[in-house]
Image (cartoon, rainbow, N blue to C red):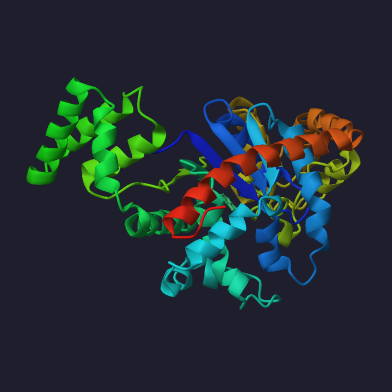
């Protein structure tokens, strides 16, 4: 890991409707897990939602707070994670504007989601400037917090790659302060005689002979320094490898390992397919939705044997049912010794049990909206502090007079 990488995680979700089990299994459980080992920033990406829902934005305002409530109820802990709303941190927009100055048009046109999404949402006119630019807005979201890691699905990896390229370009263009070398030399002295000599030797060996071991040694040496400031450390890193000062560190994607959550029809669970169970679904509706799920089409009568591999219900068993029970159920299906109703009951029970505590907490939060708002306000304040520090550095680096 690059020593410039912070242990900070950042991720966002679009508020375009109620959260469903696909969000829970595919994203939220991972977010909750990450809270234990990282400093996490999670936000409601309401500007992102506008890039696709600008014609009827009412859903955005309605779902923003509800989405936060569902996060909290699922286990996102405001004591461990900063929870905030993108549009309340205007610094994202300022960084987006500033980065747009150095972003080649071709980089945005080449992002795969640009064409893919336009095809997917044929009913929407996405030939807008905002839609073309939204991966850059995402880069600004990430870079304004200097996040080291971004948990994303596969479809978003290209956006993280773009973010890395933008950061590299920014650092290359603006990482050199006019008195960079002098500041670096001053910083070296702060390490003490012995370490200063080690650093200089490593730098010389790397710069003169391309000795990558010396580079790694120099980086490790900087990491172990207690008595130099973070900006001096950044400077010395840049001085070591010749890249100038790293103002915006390059993030890495953290690919979520969780399997795709199947929907009620065997396709991936997604609102646009109408095959979801939301986190707020009533027990009656959960039962009804699962009872009426299609099964192996060959099992017309109870006495017809079935093939689990041809049944959407089976995909759900992979999420909810232990292997030993799965073996029994598969056997029962193939020999027609169990019926589909019995087989589905396992899923119904598991989903009800999974959602019961979450729904109780949702209810509590809905009864205490001002408590939820305080959590959001506090998160926004915390996020804004970080964002303001970064934007001040960026303004300065880009020649704008500081405020
Ligand atoms: N674009 C992401 C999505 O559509 C949401 C998002 C916005 C995001 N900004 C982000 C995710 C920054 C991770 C980091 O799902
Ligand atoms: Fe599907 Fe289960 Fe019915 Fe077999 S018994 S067809 S796996 S629902």
In this view, the residue in front, 242 or 135, is: 242
Residue 317 in view of the camera: no
| Residue 309 percent across, percent down from the top left | 59, 47
Task: Give the quadrant of the N terminus.
Answer: top left
Residues 66 and 271: in front is 66
Who is closer to the viewer here, 38 or 120?
38
Residue drawn at x 61%, y 70% as measured from the top left: 130
Q: Is residue 36 left or right of residue 223?
A: right
Residue 220 position, x and y percent, is: 27, 29
Quadrant assignment for ligand 2: top right
Q: Residue at x 51, y 46 (%)?
A: 390
Residue 156 in view = yes
Residue 403 location, x and y as percent?
A: 57, 52
* Quadrant housing residue 187: top left
Q: Along the horizontal axis of the image, is 22 left or right of 190? A: right
Asked whether, in this view, residue 257 is left or right of residue 237, the answer is right
How many numbered marks are there? Answer: 0
Question: In the picture, residue 215 is in which quadrant?
Answer: top left
Q: Residue at x 40, y 48 (%)?
A: 247
Q: Position of residue 4 (x, y in %)?
A: 37, 38
Q: Is residue 164 left or right of residue 221?
A: right
Kindly give the residue lying farthest to the left in the view shown.
Answer: 209
- Determine the residue positioned at 88% across, 41% down: 282
């Amino acid at each position: 890991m690059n020593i410039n990488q912070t242990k900070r995680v950042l991720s966002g979700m679009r508020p375009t409707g109620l959260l469903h089990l696909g969000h829970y299994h595919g994203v939220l459980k991972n977010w909750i897990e990450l809270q234990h080992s990282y400093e996490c920033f999670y936000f409601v990406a309401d500007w992102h939602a506008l890039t696709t829902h600008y014609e009827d934005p009412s859903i955005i305002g309605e779902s923003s707070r509800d989405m936060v409530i569902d996060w909290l109820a699922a286990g996102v802990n405001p004591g461990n994670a900063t929870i905030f709303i993108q549009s309340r941190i205007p610094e994202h927009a300022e960084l987006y504007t500033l980065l747009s100055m150095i972003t080649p048009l071709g980089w945005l046109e080449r992002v795969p989601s640009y064409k893919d999404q336009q095809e997917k949402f044929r009913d929407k006119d996405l030939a807008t400037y905002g839609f073309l630019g939204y991966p850059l807005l995402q880069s600004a979201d990430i870079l304004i917090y200097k996040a080291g890691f971004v948990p994303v699905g596969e479809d978003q990896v290209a956006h993280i790659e773009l973010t890395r390229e933008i950061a590299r370009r920014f650092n290359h263009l603006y990482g050199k302060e006019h008195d960079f070398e002098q500041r670096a030399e001053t910083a070296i002295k702060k390490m003490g005689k012995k370490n200063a000599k080690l650093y200089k030797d490593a730098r010389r060996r790397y710069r003169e002979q391309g000795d990558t071991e010396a580079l790694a040694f120099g980086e490790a040496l900087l990491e172990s320094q207690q008595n130099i400031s973070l900006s001096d450390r950044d400077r010395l890193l840049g001085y070591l490898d010749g890249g100038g000062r790293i103002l915006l560190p390059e993030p890495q994607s953290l690919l979520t390992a969780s399997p795709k959550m199947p929907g009620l029809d065997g396709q991936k669970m997604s609102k646009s397919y109408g095959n979801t169970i939301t986190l707020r679904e009533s027990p009656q509706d959960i039962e009804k939705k699962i009872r009426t799920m299609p099964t192996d089409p060959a099992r017309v009568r109870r006495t017809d044997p079935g093939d689990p591999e041809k049944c959407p219900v089976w995909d759900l068993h992979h999420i909810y049912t232990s292997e030993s029970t799965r073996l029994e159920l598969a056997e029962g299906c193939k020999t027609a010794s169990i019926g589909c109703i019995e087989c589905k009951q396992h899923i119904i029970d598991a989903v009800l049990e999974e959602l019961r505590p979450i729904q109780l907490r949702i209810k509590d939060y809905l009864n205490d909206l001002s408590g939820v708002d305080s959590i959001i306000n506090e998160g926004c304040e915390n996020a804004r502090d970080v964002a303001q520090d970064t934007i001040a550095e960026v303004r300065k680096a880009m020649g704008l007079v500081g405020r």
